[in-house]
Amino acid sequence: MIPRGHYYRDDVLEQEINCLFQSGYEFVCLLSEVANDKDFVCIDYRGCAVVVQNFKGELRAFQNVCTHRFNAIQHDERGNRSLTCQYHGWTFNSRGCPIGVEARVVSGSGGALDLCLPEYRIDTCGQFVFIKRSASDLTLPEFLGGYYAVLEEISQHLGPVTLFRSVPHKANWKVLVENVIDNVHCPILHRDTFVAFGFCRTPVEQTEIDGPHSSWHVPRVEIAREKLRARAMAHLDARAYKHNSFYHIYIFPNLFIASTEGASFYIGHALPIGPETTSLRARYLGPRVELKEAHRARQDVLDAQSEASGLRIVEEDRFILESIQRGVRLSTKPGAIVKGEPRIEAFMKTYVALMDGNASSRDKSSEAI
Ligand code: FES
Ligand SMILES: [Fe+2]
């Protein structure tokens, strides 16, 4: 069990960032979001301010802190603009160095090299872009283990991001993680959403745990409006990626990937802002399919429906998670994990092992499970 204090103590979050986040690979964005010159995505959480930016086709990751007077260079979560600070206008090149400022810098405050931004290594697996801030020689395939192939495969079927939304949660990031890998709450909390859509009525299947990462399929059963539903989705019948389930993948420490029958996708990214504050960055995506013009409007309706129901489920969970955050401070009990929650058990074992030692996230967590 993770002690209750680990859900609200500031010093624990500090340790987690070092032992769990920075020691492995940290997800930033999808390749499709930084496909064009000047596209950028930032991640911003405790001890981490990073921008991944496209420089004429080359992707670079830098600390998103101006080397002049420490302003954030990119302020938006994502967008398209040069890497130019909005305070005094310094522009940084693809090596992270400010262009043409050396002559203006007062001597003694550093030469040109000292004005360049710290750079981080970027690695990709399919569409998924990760950075590595530590100097360890852990590779991305080693870090992802069997999920490297899974992410590569699912990447081939991801369509465009149709909605990008950050949802603030007054809860510790681990409360969000434990929620998405919790098997039991779905039929109770999501009666009007998941259950109404035909999920969570039969036990989960194909639970896979590999090192710190895990997945399962939540099977779908037929619902009353099945024929209507089939008609609305008929234009997707020929899609290459199909499964009659909600397939959920957790990539340690804070990335959630879900496919609903291969017809719509969700990517959740839990950013630990503070010990009791997490920003859930939610991306909703359609499938990668060639659509006839006549089917475009139909797909737009499906995209809008999956975004709306997805956000509703996020809100159903958020209400409970914020209550948990209050309870974890008030309770004098240690809490419990019920039987049949292998993903939560795996997460907790990994967590404890990594917080106790200095081994790499992959080595230590594999030993732990
Ligand atoms: S703080 Fe960035 S240019 Fe001055
Ligand atoms: Fe939930």
Image (cartoon, helix red, strand yellow):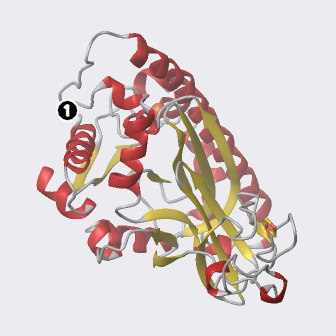
Query: Does residue 193 sit above or below 217 in this rendering?
Result: above
- Report the side of 369 relative to 362 (left or right): left
Query: Does residue 296 sit above or below 202 in this rendering?
Result: below
> Which residue is rendered at x = 32% and y = 66% of the image?
147
Query: Where is residue 306 drawn, in percent x and y?
Result: 63, 46
> Which residue is rendered at x = 62% and y = 76% of the image?
117
- Report the side of 3 relative to 91 (left or right): left
Q: Nearer the viewer, residue 65 or 228?
A: 65
> Which residue is rendered at x = 37% and y = 38% of the image?
12
Query: Where is residue 85 drawn, in percent x and y?
Result: 80, 69
The residue under label 1 is 340
Q: Nearer the viewer, residue 67 or 84?
A: 67
Query: Where is residue 195 drawn, in percent x and y?
Result: 47, 30
Task: Find numbered disc 1 in the image and state the secondary structure of the residue it sits on.
Answer: loop
Quarter of the image where one finds residue 97: bottom right
Mark 1: amino acid: Gly
Residue that lies at the very extreme toward the front in this rendered image: 108
Is residue 240 among what the camera can see?
no
Q: Nearer the viewer, residue 302 or 67?
A: 67
Query: Does residue 334 sit above or below 1 in this rendering?
Result: above
How many residues crowd mark 1 within 10 Å: few (<14), some (14–19), many (20+)?
few
- Report the side of 279 relative to 305 (left or right): left
Is residue 166 among what the camera can see?
yes
Query: Where is residue 232 drawn, in percent x and y?
Result: 66, 51
Query: Does residue 363 sit above or below 308 in this rendering?
Result: below
> Which residue is rendered at x = 58% and y = 50% of the image?
230
So how many labels did they put on this image?
1
Quarter of the image where one finds residue 234: bottom right
Asked whether mark 1 lies closer than 8 Å to ligand 2, one says no
